[in-house]
Amino acid sequence: MSIPNPPVHRSERPTAPVAATPAPAASGGRAADLTARAALVVVWSSGFISGKLGLRHAAPYTFAALRFAIAGLVLLAVALARRDRLPRGRQLLHLCVAGALVQAVQFSSIYVGMDLGVPSGLAALIIALYPLTASLLAVPVLGERVTAGQYLGLVLGLGGVALAVAEGIHVSGGYLLGLGFLVLGLLGISVGTVYQKRFCGRMDPVSGNAVQLLAASLVALVPALAYEGWDVEFTAGYAPVLLWSALINSIVGVGLLYHLLQRHGTSQVSSLFYLVPMSTAVLGALVLGQHLGPLTLGGLVLATAGTLLANRVRR
């Protein structure tokens, strides 16, 4: 249905057409979008590094509960200072469910898996399956369409991930249980982001994230108290790791994820996670002194090509 043009009064004289000029916001918007995508990959990758360092000072669920609580309280203070209207009713319930899945289930499971001996590279590889699982869920739930080229890009990305982390995989005791927790984390982020896009698409980035993080903190607090006995050592080395994971990984990282989900399809955004294992390998080499071999570099090239193909926008 088209909107009719408004009537023109007789006293109005037609004016000469004005030549259209390209909107500067268009290129600026594309640059900002690319920056947001790159930032999401780097920030999300740093979460594996901060998690590995944080587990030296705290048990997995305790570390997760502290991370979520600090981030949630910071955002809640900002929301109250801005006098934002806090979520309530059904919206509050949806935010709590999405927060429990994306934050608590995913990150707590990653921490438990790595604490049980699963290498960070293998953990990143399993979570990198998220593009496939989230895209498959988004088709029936959200009615999204995934083109053949995007599927090909997803497969190439997965192959690049496997190639990149092959050098760093070392099986150790307890890894089977750890793998089970990582699969649980994969399900958490896959179901959670689809749920987020379906029921929380208009979420306020400050108050909504505050609710999700505080809900995730309560979920992680139960096993932290029941099974770990609140096992944590507050040291000078632990403080910056905890603050990084709370402020950068929880607030900035998830905020970037939800921002991109509001602008693009789930399959396009989730395919960026194919770059996380390679980015993690680079950060591990810089921060932890881990080896970055030829397979990792080859996988980076292959996964980058797959990600670019999967992120092609259909017009």
Image (cartoon, rainbow, N blue to C red):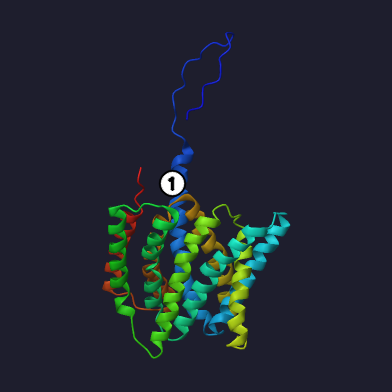
Q: Give the labeled residue for mark 1.
A: 30
Q: Is residue 50 visible?
A: yes
Position above or below: 161 against 79:
below
Residue 222 occupies quadrant: bottom right
Q: Element type at marker 1?
A: helix
**Residue at x 42%, y 71% (from the top left corner):** 283
**Residue at x 55%, y 20% (from the top left corner):** 6
Position above or below: 177 against 190:
below
Pick out the residue farthest to the front.
Answer: 140
Q: Amino acid at mark 1?
A: Arg
**Where does the image place residue 33, in percent across and percent down from the top left?**
45, 50
Pick out the residue farthest to the top.
Answer: 10
- Left or right: 266 as drawn, with respect to 294: right
Viewer-proximal residue among 184 and 270: 184
**Where does the image place residue 111, in percent across and percent down from the top left?**
49, 79
Quadrant, the C terminus = top left
- Left or right: 120 as drawn, with respect to 101: left
Viewer-proximal residue among 138 and 70: 138
- Left or right: 180 as drawn, with respect to 57: left
**Where does the image place residue 95, in percent across and percent down from the top left?**
59, 62
Viewer-proximal residue among 38 and 175: 175
